[in-house]
Amino acid sequence: MFEGGSRRPRRAVPHIREFLADGLTPRITAALDGNLAERSRHRGIRPINRGVSRNPVDHPNGGGAGKSKSGGGWQQLTSPWGLLAKGYRTRNKRKLSSRFIVVRRDGRPMKQR
C-alpha cells in the first residue's frame, strides 16, 4: 500500500493525487484526461437522447424548428410508441381486482357501482 513513504488513493474520477504517508500533506496532484462517455459505454450504458431533439420519423415528439415543443405546436408528450406520457390512465377499467380498491392514491374515493 505504501511505496517509499507515500500512498496513492484509488479514485473513480480521472485524477491522480499522491499524499505523504501521514495522509494529510499532498505531494503530487496530477490530472489525467478522462473520457467519461467512453467509460459509460464500456459498462454497457447507452447514451440518452430526448424525443424532442429527434426527427419526426424517429419519435412522436420530434421535429419543429429550434427548441419547439414536439412538432412545432403544443402536442401532448408521448412515448416512442405514441402512448401519452403524462396523466394518461393505463389501468384496465374492467380488471377484476378494481372492486377491491376503495380509495385512490390521491385520497379521492372510487365510484361505487
Image (cartoon, rainbow, N blue to C red):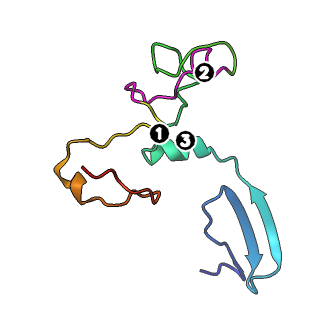
Magenta segment, principal secondary structure?
loop
Which mark's residue is nearer the viewer, 3 or 2?
A: 2
Q: Is residue 79 magenta?
A: yes
85 or 30: nearer the viewer: 85
Say which residue appears at 83% left-offset and 79% top-offset.
25
Residue 64 in percent (x, y) is at 62, 13
Side of 66 relative to 77 (left or right): right
Amino acid type for the residue under numbered disc 3: Glu
Residue interval drawn in magenta: 68-83
Q: Which residue is mark 2?
A: 74
Amino acid type for the residue under numbered disc 2: Trp
43 or 102: nearer the viewer: 102
Is label 2 in contact with label 1 (beta carbons under 8 Å)?
no
Amino acid type for the residue under numbered disc 1: Gly
Which element type, helix, strand or loop, lies under badge 2?
Answer: loop
Q: Which residue is mark 1?
A: 87
Q: Residue furthest left?
A: 96
Cα–Cα gap, marks 2 and 1: 16 Å
Quadrant where the N terminus sits is: bottom right
Side of 20 relative to 80 (left or right): right
Cα–Cα gap, marks 3 and 2: 36 Å
Which element type, helix, strand or loop, lies under badge 3?
Answer: helix
Q: Residues within 10 Å of mark 3 (few under 14, many from 20)?
A: few
Say which residue appears at 54% left-offset and 31% top-offset.
49
Q: Which residue is mark 3?
A: 38
Is label 3 in contact with label 2 (beta carbons under 8 Å)?
no
Q: Is residue 45 magenta?
A: no
Of mark 2 and mark 1, the one earlier in the sequence is: 2
> Quarter-wise, where is residue 93 in the image?
top left
Of mark 1 and mark 3, the one earlier in the sequence is: 3
> Quarter-wise, where is residue 99 in the image?
bottom left
